[in-house]
Amino acid sequence: MEGKDLTKGNLLKNMALLLIPLFLTNLLNSIYSLVDGIWVGNLIGETGVSVITNCYPLIRIITSISSGLAVGTSVLVSQYYGAKDRKKLKSIVGVSYLITLIVGFTTSFLMIITSSLWLKLLNTPFEILDVAKQYLIIYSIGYLFNFILVVIMEAIRATGNSIVPFIFIVISTTINIILDPILIKTGFGVVGTAVATLIAMIIGTVIAIIYVNSKSELLKIDFKYFKFNKKMVLDFFKIGIPVIIENCFLAGMHLLEVKVSNSSGLIGNAGYGVASKVEQFLAVVCASLTTVATVTVGQFIGIKKIKESTNVMKQGLKLTILPIIIVILVVFVFPRQFCRIFVSSQEVISMAIIYISAVRISHVIMPVENLVHGFIIGTGHTKFALFSSTVSCIAEICTILILRNTNLESLAVLGTGVLIWVFTHLTLDSIYYFSNKWQKIVVKKVENEI
């Protein structure tokens, strides 16, 4: 079998070796938006930052759907890989690719034709509305290709190989970094960053397709497996749909946050946009921990070692120590210096600090929260993951609605709402994990299927 069996040998070492290239991959992947923010903030100013800020939650909606497809792929591929079942593995890969093509095209098309409606719903400042629409349309075209790239990378990671996806991202990110300033300065403005991302995504996807077709017998695009196997389609959507809904809820929360930040005007919205770069950086760490837990737990379940999978949590907590230290330095010691990377306006930085000051405690515990959440997803019980996120979203909305009637600055209200979301999420996931209910569900499933 290709890839690496994470259940054999030193578990902490295996998880760390999976985490490092995965972290670097996610870091480089996030640089699409981080680099866009740096170039736009320094070459265009708060107007350009506001364009990206208003488009980002809409892009997250598209990303939410691709993430759900990726999780469905990751959980099933890791389980069949752990069970050494080549036939089922190739079948689920074919199902994943087929569904990704259909859903990816539909999602991108719908976002393009409804772009104006979404931006108006956000109360996007009138002076940037047309530019924001152009940016969103171009980015949406790019995400049609990114759907394919994300699922291919997730399938490769599920076999324990996180190095190859890292190489894909190095190439596409390098292209994006080079093209960004060139296209901005040649008259495209902030829209140039979207064009740069589009080109980078196309090239990254082409390289990924060439790789799996030439180097991976298990994961190559084989059209004879492009058929709707009823059981596998149901399994795929049973895992993937709750994740899609969950992530869409989170994207919806981000829409609400941007809408609230727009009530503080262009400066307030830009301040929120700069502050959210801290969260985008943190999301790199958290997404990496989530994937490591999901893939490793999936492989343990594939070989029917249910109780042993709890070691993933114990060893994973050790992996959160360094990220937590880094986050503490960023949000408690050097928040202003971090903000200066993206914008020089003291007004915008001051607004960003208001948000960071309210939310930073939650940032410290987010790596642990995402580790627990990734474990639950790895067991395949994504319905509880959806429930946990839904309740957390309701808690954040209630907090924002209550505090908006006070004299608090809107960005302080937003930060407090996010803080409540994280604490609620961690509490619910932890209760479920320690209840051991997931073990009973997984044991029953393994007895019936694997």
Image: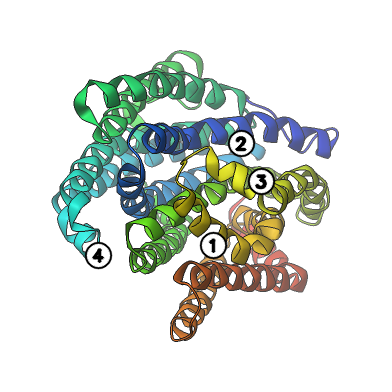
Hey, which residue is sitting farthest right in the picture? 10
Q: Position of residue 223 (x, y in %)?
A: 31, 28
What element does badge 3 sit on? helix
Question: Cβ–Cβ below 8 Å for labels 1 and 2?
Answer: no
Q: Tell me the number on the disc at residue 355.
A: 1
State the CA–CA distance, disc 1 to disc 3: 25 Å
Picture quadrant of residue 419: bottom right
What element does badge 4 sit on? loop
179 or 238: nearer the viewer? 179
Q: Residue at x 48, y 39 (%)?
A: 342
Picture quadrant of residue 37: top left
For marks 4 and 1 on the same chain, the one whose residue lies earlier in the sequence:
4
User: Mark 1: which amino acid?
Assistant: Tyr
User: Mark 2: which amino acid?
Assistant: Tyr
Question: Cβ–Cβ below 8 Å for labels 4 and 1?
Answer: no
Label 3: how many Cα within 10 Å (few below 14, some 14–19, many 20+): many
Residue that carries the numbered disc 4 in the rendered image: 123
Question: Cβ–Cβ below 8 Å for labels 1 and 3?
Answer: no
Q: Tell me the number on the disc at residue 433.
A: none
User: Mark 3: which amino acid?
Assistant: Leu
User: Mark 4: which amino acid?
Assistant: Asn
Q: Tell me the number on the disc at residue 81.
A: 2
Is residue 235 something that shows in the picture?
no
